[in-house]
Image (cartoon, grey):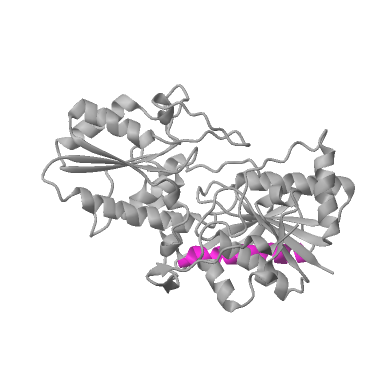
Amino acid sequence: MKNVIVGQSGGPTAVINSSLLGVYKTARDRGADIVYGMVHGIKGLLDREIVDLSTRLKNDLDMDLLKRTPSSFLGSCRYKLPEIKGNEKTYEKIFSILEELEIYAFFYIGGNDSMDTIMRLSDYAAIIDSPIKFIGVPKTIDNDLAITDHTPGFGSAAKYIAATTKEIIRDGLVYDYPVVSVIEVMGRNAGWLTAATALAKGEDCEGVDLVYLPEVTFDIDAFVKRVGKLLKEERSIVIAVSEGVKVADGRYVCELSDHVDYVDAFGHKQLAGTARFLAGKIAEKYGVKTRAIELSSLQRCAAHIQSRIDVTEAFNCGGAGVKAAFEGKSGVVITLKRVSENPYMCITEVADVHLIANVEKKVPREWITDDGTDVTAGLVQYIMPLIQAEITPLWINGLPRHIRLHAKSTIK
């Protein structure tokens, strides 16, 4: 018997369920007897919140809805597994549950922190000589996983951000008085998402005026002066800034006005308020109308504007994970390798999880202008193929139809 189990962890995306579908369909096609789902990731497994996915994905319509449904169908968690040494009982419990379910392979769809989970579980499996395979399936809108060319979820988020930026630019140009709009984009330490605002520029759009990524130290005084200069030249100014930009002393800009209390299990501070702080600085200095626009969670799960490329690659990564496990691999993460630019093409490969877990891939400095206020054409060209084509939602009564997991499906 070859039963498998899959979970989703970390922040959701518009295509994370396409990866789930890739795992489910490929596992069934390759002869898996039962495909279990962990409800709320590894924490749900510890709590024995488990579902037989075949009880919910009963037909082609269910599966088609799944890939069009945003966010994590199985639910998520930000649960950090402890160090193995001294916490063996936690791992004994996990492996006892997996053995009880007769699990052959364990798949975890997520980002950096989720790959930490795969690393610890595969390391423990090696210690006790367990035959269970542990495979990481990449996911994160932040695009900050090492080795892989990019991550599923990033393309759809970038598409939403670029399209929304174009609309914000159009909105600001209708007035006959100065308006400064500051768009705050997700990105704690890596500015990939904020860079996507640069895609708005084209023959039909003026583009953003300034782009600030966390890879470059943020100088508030220089920023204010730069905006003042632009106000002498333009009526509407649109600025994109990563939520995680920091000043020279290492503090996040958002911490300069708001005390940040919430810290998750992985030590990440909740960041918000960067745009509001900077818009306030501009209003105070120049007396002009300002807008602070936080895209916040809207950029994560905009399935109405999914990138078809993103959906396809997410599914392929899930399927490649199953293939790797059934070929005997463990302790690996599926990666994407760009093999052609024109036409664009990526293939899947595998990499040792130890080379990916807890490693953050940032935007290369050469893809940011020397003065740190914009990105280069090379970065735009890197992102552009990832936002191509669309998958249309299934519209019911004027709204997109989603699929959801019912509590009664859970096996206790």
What percent of the width, then of the height, locates residue 78? 62, 43
Seen from the viewer's position, the closer of residues 43 and 369 is 43
Above or below residue 217? Residue 31 is: below
Q: Is residue 167 shown in magenta?
A: no
What percent of the width, then of the height, locates residue 307? 45, 64
Left or right of 243: which side holds 117?
Answer: right
Q: Is residue 310 shown in magenta?
A: yes
Left or right of 231: which side holds 79?
Answer: right
Seen from the viewer's position, the closer of residues 391 and 223 is 391
Residue at the spot 18% in from the left edge and 34% down from the top edge: 288
Left or right of 260: which side holds 105?
Answer: right
Residue at the spot 61% in from the left edge and 54% down from the top edge: 75
Residue 327 in sight from this viewpoint: no
Residue at the left extreme of this rendering: 176
Residue at the spot 80% in from the left edge and 42% down from the top edge: 90
**Residue 109, image quadrant:** bottom right
Magenta-highlighted residues: 308-327
Above or below residue 271? Residue 13 is: below
What percent of the width, then of the height, locates residue 318? 64, 63
What percent of the width, then of the height, locates residue 407? 64, 60
Residue at the top extreme of this rendering: 249
Q: Say which quadrant the C terminus sits in.
A: bottom right
Above or below residue 40? Residue 369 is: above
